[in-house]
Amino acid sequence: MKTYCYIKTPLGKLLAVQGEKGLEKLFLPFNGNIMQPNPDWTEDFNYLKQTSDEICAYFNKELTTFSIPLDPEGTLFQQNVWRLLTLIPFGTTASYKDIAERVGRSKGCRAVGGAVGKNPIPVIIPCHRVIGADGSLTGFSGGLDIKRYLLNLEGGRYF
């Protein structure tokens, strides 16, 4: 059974989806469009209250580390990359090359980029903290404006 709720943020409404083991998906609005839930999902804000509380605290600059249980679906490689993303400290960034080296594939920047791009729980699994080796902002599923917003929220200097 999957449960969902919408969470109001400065980015717009996020759609959070929880399974039995933890948060599985977090959908950002894209081009102003809010993701619609699957008809098989059940809406239950109370079930996702901790997720909502932590996301709101993050956007209010009251939380720098999330503690909610996560259960993203992906390949073993994707899981490894996503786990490494959670280790990038709040307010800092890492390059795709850094992540590729940490995952044991020093020449695997594109593979890492693919895994980062498929992250089903952005913000909480902080794929926005991954930038180009030259310090440039690179792709982000929510768009570069949202990536810039999140980095600035965390104290970065990406205007």
Image (cartoon, rainbow, N blue to C red):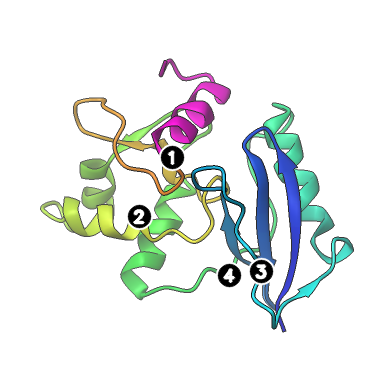
Residue 63 image-quadrant placement? top right
Instruction: In the rendered structure, find residue 128 and report the number of the disc placed on it.
Output: 1
Q: CA distance from mark 1 to mark 2?
A: 10 Å
Residue 96 coordinates in the image, percent (x, y) = 25, 44
Magenta-colored stretch includes residue 155: yes
Q: Amino acid at mark 2?
A: Gly
Q: Residue at x 68, y 35 (%)?
A: 58
Q: Quadrant of the N terminus?
A: bottom right
Instruction: In the rendered structure, find residue 117 and report the number of the disc placed on it.
Output: 2
Task: Determine whether label 3 and label 1 are within 8 Å by CB.
Answer: no
Q: CA distance from mark 3 to mark 1?
A: 24 Å
Earlier sequence position, callout 3 versus callout 2: 3
Residue 143 image-quadrant placement? top left
Residue 124 coordinates in the image, percent (x, y) = 58, 49
Query: Is residue 91 shown to the viewer in this render?
Result: no
Earlier sequence position, callout 4 versus callout 1: 4
Few, some or many residues within 10 Å of mark 2 (<14, 14–19, 20+): some
Earlier sequence position, callout 2 versus callout 4: 4
Query: Is residue 39 shown to the viewer in this render?
Result: yes
Earlier sequence position, callout 3 versus callout 4: 3
Residue 71 coordinates in the image, percent (x, y) = 58, 70
Earlier sequence position, callout 1 versus callout 2: 2
Magenta-colored stretch includes residue 55: no
Direction from residue 79 to residue 57 in the image, left or right? right
| Residue, disc 4 | 71
Of tags 3 and 4, the one toward the viewer is 3
Of tags 3 and 2, the one toward the viewer is 3
Task: Determine whether label 3 and label 4 are within 8 Å by CB.
Answer: no
Report the span colored magenta.
143-159
Residue at the left extreme of this rendering: 107
Of tags 4 and 1, the one toward the viewer is 1
